[in-house]
Amino acid sequence: MKSFDPPQESPPTPELLNPTNPVPEFVAATIPGAVMSIPKNQRVHLMHGRDLAMWDGRKLGFFLIGNPDVPEASEGTFPGPTIRVPRGVVFHSYVEAHGQPAHTVHWHGIEPTAMNDGVGHTSMELGEYTYQWQPNHIGSYFYHCHRSTIQHFDFGLYDFLIVEPPDAYDASDGKNVGGYPRRTAANLAKYPNFPGFIGGNLESGDPHAMTVPYDVEALWVIDDIDSVWREQADHVHQTFPKMGDEPGVNDDFHENDSGSYDFFAFHDYNPDYFVVTGVNFPGRIGSAVSIRPGLTVQAGLNSGVAGMQISINAKRNQTILVRLLCAA
């Protein structure tokens, strides 16, 4: 169902349930200055327009995702704040669209109801809205804006969405919540070199069934950027058509052209900047340039989980989990 475009009001969430996600409460309790302004709710703000410096000092325009409840993320980050959620909880995210409309949030890999799926033109466009869904599978996913998708994604409206074991934020057993080792889903029955693997099946009720612990975690969000896209589409309506009196038949796709029939349609891509988890570095594909050591991500940008790395530092015999989001 397409509710409105451009958004003029905030539709109610169908069949709204009470949220049970413990992560916002954990973040508010562990990150200095963080709050939980809406109980058990992961807040998301789209979009924060900012210029970010590349490795050569040149500044490029980005559209960013922010979380107003966390100081480090309030003005938007590239990539966006990592969202973590335990399997099986009722997840709520109150999303506000800033800047020019329209926007959505698509929870890529999650299968919620159509209204909460966040695909532009087929679900609902923001405005403001409380997304609701329940994750059923542990693993690495991502979330992104799905309106004017090619431009919005390339300009930075995305990041990781991680589903963890159902007890990942349960401190009742005295484990190190928010630290390491942590667990992820895996089938390692034939690989005894990874200690701590628990088999079984999900029907057993064991929250750790078919999971393995890991000691070091890296979130690699790799992206390449064509700066010409910024030059030719310097605002979010650059490629929007002007609707004719017969929509889809005589729309004007050249209203914003700099010259006659110079419509820029995101079909020519020649990246000249490369980044890993927001850290940019010189060199093109195949270069020998490596990322500098000792880089980590603040816990406030990682749902309160400390120790997540960009440049990996591990000891012998430790298990390393690399989560890779290819945003290229």
Image (spheres, grey):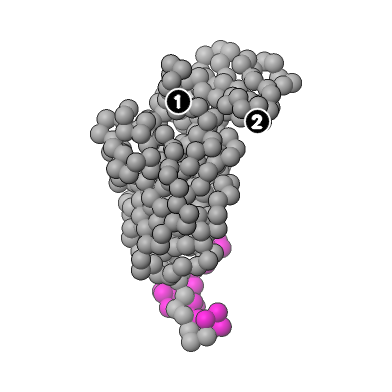
**Which SS does the magenta portion mostly show?**
loop
Q: Residue furthest left?
A: 33
Instruction: Report which quarter residue 54 is drawn in.
Output: top left
The one of 171 and 152 positioned closer to us in this rendering: 171
In the image, residue 110 lies in the stretch drawn in magenta: no
Q: Position of residue 272 (x, y in %)?
A: 48, 49
The region drawn magenta spans 247-269
Q: At which x and y percent is residue 123?
A: 51, 62
Q: Image height check: is 187 above or below 36?
A: above
Instruction: Please rate how many residues cluster around mark 2, counting C-alpha atoms within 10 Å: few if below 14, some from 14 to 19, many from 20.
Output: few
Q: Quadrant of residue 49?
A: bottom left
Q: Residue at position x 48%, y 87% from top? A: 245
Crowdedness of circle 1 by 10 Å Cα count: few (<14), some, many (20+)? some
Inspect the image, locate mark 1, and give the three-letter code of the amino acid beneath it.
Asp
Residue 202, label in figure: 2
Is residue 116 among the parts visible in the rendering?
Answer: yes
Amino acid type, callout 2: Leu
Q: Is residue 253 magenta?
A: yes
Which residue has dot 1 on it? 170
Q: Position of residue 191 (x, y in %)?
A: 71, 19
- Badge 1 marks a residue whose secondary structure is loop
Q: Could you tell me which secondary element the residue under label 2 belongs to?
A: helix
The answer to which of marks 1 and 2 sits earlier in the sequence is: 1
Residue plotted at (53% across, 66% down): 1
